[in-house]
Image (spheres, grey):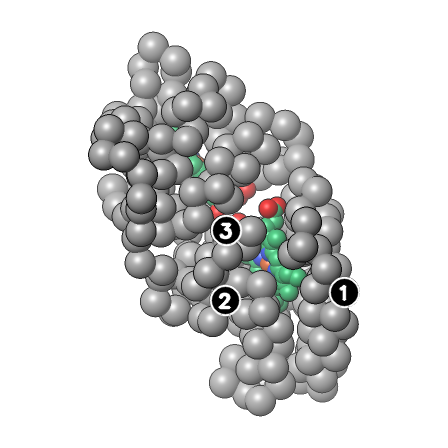
Amino acid sequence: MSRRMNRGPAVLALAAALATWVGSARAQDLDVGSETARRAIHVCASCHGDGGRSKSPAYPSLAGQPAAYTARQLMDFRAQQRAEADSKAYMWGVSALLDDGSIQALAAYYEKQTPPAGRSKAPAALLRTGQKLFQEGSASQGIRACAACHGDHAEGAAGFPRLAGQHADYLVSQLKIFSTRLRPHGVLMKAETASMTPAQMKAVAAYLQSL
Ligand code: HEC
Ligand code: HEC
């Protein structure tokens, strides 16, 4: 895919920016207002968009994501535990450059950014199906209400990610990955996704992107 083509240069630019930021910095300099931090964030933005509001469905939005969740994902990439092909190709190299302090600083930065606005071209019936699954789950399939963990408005909290406004394609890809071993911290999601049909995944993802 074409998005693969810019990975090398982006990671090299990030390496340069981060080497200055992480290498020269003491904890107090990890302040994301610093010039070197801004340069590092600029590299994340080349894929994840300005302020973490991604314009491309190939890259998840990070804006408004609870800091604890973002920090955990960066640590999981760095430990090579979140191991789906796109994670390996894009985030293993990036996260290897981050120490714990810079992970916390980046996570705190993204939590403060304004989340992406909801958008949808999906048919109303699909959105209603998705909304019902999100709010009520499906008792007959053993699927709990998504809202119980992700929040009534899918706003997320602590280790539970924000899903509102996220790209539907990315959400579906992750729902499929949870039934594999490639996202071990998704263990809470295994029961939910094991019995979910592809049509249900599509519906709930369309609903979430619209929020
Ligand atoms: C070259 C492109 C690229 C760059 C640069 C990049 N990322 Fe990513 N990032 C991705 C892709 C692609 C994914 C989705 C991986 C998947 O689908 O498994 C991702 C996933 C993530 C996730 C998980 C999001 C979620 O909802 O679970 C976080 C957090 C993240 N990136 C943070 C960062 C940070 C912080 C930086 C800068 C230090 C950065 N990324 C730089 C491409 C990139
Ligand atoms: C018991 C709590 C719980 C329930 C119920 C639950 N989730 Fe989750 N979900 C989580 C946790 C925890 C994570 C983060 C996993 C990780 O850290 O890797 C997550 C992650 C996700 C992600 C990945 C987000 C990202 O940015 O990568 C998606 C998509 C998701 N959940 C969708 C759903 C949907 C749809 C439902 C309802 C059908 C649902 N969840 C029900 C706890 C839950």
Given residues 114 and 68, the one toward you in this image is: 114
Q: Are marks 2 and 1 in contact (CB under 8 Å)?
A: no
Distance of mark 3 from mark 1, alpha carbons?
20 Å
| Mark number displayed over residue 65 | none
Q: Are marks 3 and 1 in contact (CB under 8 Å)?
A: no
**How far, Cα to Cα, is label 2 from label 1?**
17 Å
Q: Kindly tell me whether residue 69 is visible in this rendering.
A: yes
State the residue position of label 3: 57
Under mark 1, the amino acid is: Gly
Q: Position of residue 152 (x, y in %)?
A: 25, 42
Circle 1 Cα neighbour tier, 10 Å, few/some/many (<14 / 14–19 / ≥20): few
- What x and y, as percent, mark residue 77? 67, 51
Secondary structure of the residue carrying numbered label 2: loop
Q: How many residues crowd mark 3 within 10 Å: few (<14), some (14–19), many (20+)?
A: some
Count how many numbered circles sit on residues in the image: 3
Instruction: Report the amino acid beneath label 3.
Output: Pro
Going from N to C along the chain, the mark reached first, 3 or 1, is 1
Residue 125, image quadrant: top left
* Dot placed on the residue nearer the N-terminal end, 2 or 1: 1
Q: Quadrant of ligand 2?
A: top left
Give me the residue at 70% from left, 64% from top: 6
13 over 80 or under it: above or below: below
How far is disc 2 from disc 3 in space, using C-alphas? 11 Å
The numbered mark at residue 8 is 1
Identify which residue is drawn at 52% across, 26% down: 190
Q: In the rendered image, which residue does mark 2 sit on?
A: 49
Task: Decide if ligand 1 comes within 8 Å of the CB at mark 2.
Answer: no
Q: Quadrant of residue 150?
A: top left
Question: Dot 2: few (<14), some (14–19), or many (≥20) neighbours within 10 Å?
Answer: many
Label 1, secondary structure: give it. helix
